[in-house]
Amino acid sequence: KIREIFIPGGWFPFKEKSDIDLVIEKGDKVIAVEIETGKNKPEQTRKNIEKLLKFNAGQKFILPTNEIALVKTKNLFSEINLPGQEAIQIIPVKDFLKIPPA
């Protein structure tokens, strides 16, 4: 679904690029996306956050797919303290689809 929104705008989406769920590129702009379903254990979600932090992208998102995933992700995010984590935006996937980044 995310891919369908970006392709018409000239973006190139790549699934599982550099172990990131979705990387979307247009020229020198790069967006990195991790999808959270709420099924991951906290350790795996933390690893996903760390992967996003290490990945070179202008915009970084964690997109929870449901309310449970959103709460779990936000709670974990507030408990950890990793350098640069403020650069990651946590937005429900349905909201991200309504207003994709430019």
Image (spheres, grey):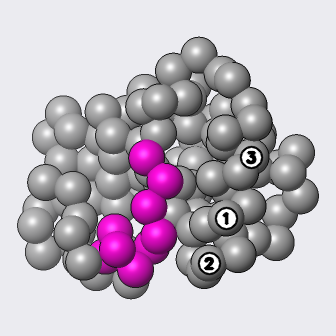
Residue numbers of the magenta segment: 89-97
Residue at (66% x, 42% y) in the render? 77
Q: Quick one: SS at disc 3?
A: helix
Q: Residues within 10 Å of mark 2 (few under 14, many from 20)?
A: few
Q: CA distance from mark 2 to mark 1?
A: 6 Å
Residue 96 inside the magenta-drawn segment: yes
Identity, as a three-letter code, of the amino acid under mark 2 = Glu
Pointer 2 with pointer 1, Cβ within 8 A = yes
Identity, as a three-letter code, of the amino acid under mark 3 = Leu
In the image, 16 versus 87, the foreground residue is 87
Q: CA distance from mark 1 to mark 3?
A: 9 Å
Identity, as a three-letter code, of the amino acid under mark 1 = Val
Q: Is residue 50 left or right of residue 102?
A: right
Q: Quick one: SS at disc 1?
A: helix
Residue at (40% x, 80% y) in the render? 94
Residue 93 lies, in percent from the top left, at 45, 73
Residue 89 lies, in percent from the top left, at 43, 47
Residue 24 visible? The answer is yes
Q: Residues within 10 Å of mark 3 (few under 14, many from 20)?
A: some
In the picture, residue 85 is in which quadrant? top right
Residue 90 inside the magenta-drawn segment: yes
Residue at (47% x, 39% y) in the render? 88
Residue 5 lies, in percent from the top left, at 24, 77
Q: Quick one: SS at disc 2?
A: helix
Residue 37 visible? The answer is no
**Which mark identifies residue 71?**
1
Residue marked by disc 2? 67
Residue marked by disc 3? 76
